[in-house]
Image (tube, rainbow, N blue to C red):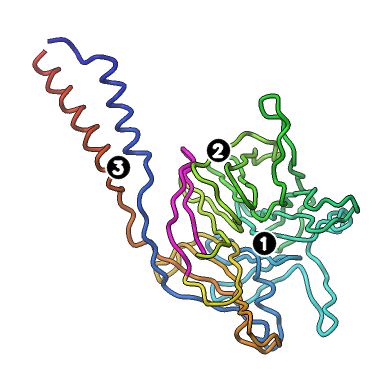
Amino acid sequence: MKPPSLHRLALAGALLAASINAQAAETWVETSVDHFYLHNPPYSMTGLFRSQGVASDGQQWFFSWQYGLERTDDAFASLQRNSAIALPSLAITPGIPAALVAQGLNHIGDIDYASGLIYAPIEDGGDFDGDGIKYEKPVIALYNAADLSYTGAYYELPTTLNVNGTQENILTAGVPWVAVDTARGVGYTAEWNNATRLNVFNLDNWSFQGFINLDQTLDRIQGAKVRGDALYAAADNDTGSVYRISLLDGSVQEILQLALPAGSQEMEGLAFRDTPDGASLHVLHINDPLNADTSLSSTSINVALHHYKLVSAVPEPETYALMLAGLGLVGFMARRRKTA
């Protein structure tokens, strides 16, 4: 008999590739929540210093707030901060480099850690130069994780790009987060709202490399981290959604919704780190109920770090179908080869 046609071989390969590359359906279960307050220890403003982003090197935690960074031990006891806020005057000593402050940069978003460095996305949240435009200078600044000192290196990201002969705007609402992918040697950003693609940059010099198009639009993304072949992103939407974005094909899957309390709150960053209780995904949000007592002693106002454990990651039904079809076709062709 004739050997299998190239068409059948190509079809079998496509089916098997689809079964391998399809995203698995993940189920995450919350194991615990840590709360950080303004008054505990007495008026240390702990929650404030952990109100934007979170990352880890596997041994300690790193947090960001609008003006600086903090590192803590496993039990979240503060080890060091590179910024300060004085009470009762609320005078701020920023951890943002003076040269960037002078350019109007005043907001650090969700940070990331890699190879001894903290990558901090910093943006200008106000109209510093008086031209009526905000978010004109998205920057990635590098800090030493060991002592939170500024390395002296920062990279200004483009806000416009020439794409196939057309000038396109990117990062129109600043750079609220950055995610580092050391395995691929790149870093990712995206639009804060109405994100239809990921921006990919070379990790060495933050030159633009290209886009990863998403199969659905994502809104109000506040933080993201890479895990394997996926980018996990936290959205400040009504459901407190966390999404898994395939870095292979841009497909998007909602993996969990935070059980957020009633009232006003804001989703922030997220991190991956294995902890003794089996958790590996950690999601940060600010709890600030609309009717809460606004005094510094109020426990209603806090920053919460939710810890999640992955309890299942199994192929979706359509993935099973593709896999079985592909295996069946390969088996059929193998039988034909034996009888040829």
Q: Which residues are magenta?
A: 240-258
Q: Which residue is mark 3?
A: 319
Looking at the image, which residue is at 64% across and 39% down? Answer: 201
- Measure the C-alpha gap from mark 1 to mark 2: 33 Å
Give the residue at mark 1. 146
Relative depth, front residue between 241 and 102: 241
* Mark found first going from the N terminus, 2 or 3: 2
Numbered disc 3: secondary structure: helix
Residue kind at label 3, given as amino acid type: Thr
Q: Which residue is mark 2?
A: 212
Q: Residues within 10 Å of mark 1 (few under 14, many from 20)?
A: few
> Which part of the image, by quadrant, shows the C terminus?
top left
The majority secondary structure of the magenta stretch comes to: strand
Q: Residue furthest top?
A: 2
Quadrant in the picture for residue 116: bottom right
| Numbered circle sitting on residue 330 | none
Mark 2 residue type: Ile
Q: Position of residue 241 (x, y in %)?
A: 50, 61
Q: Nearer the viewer, residue 26 or 118?
A: 26
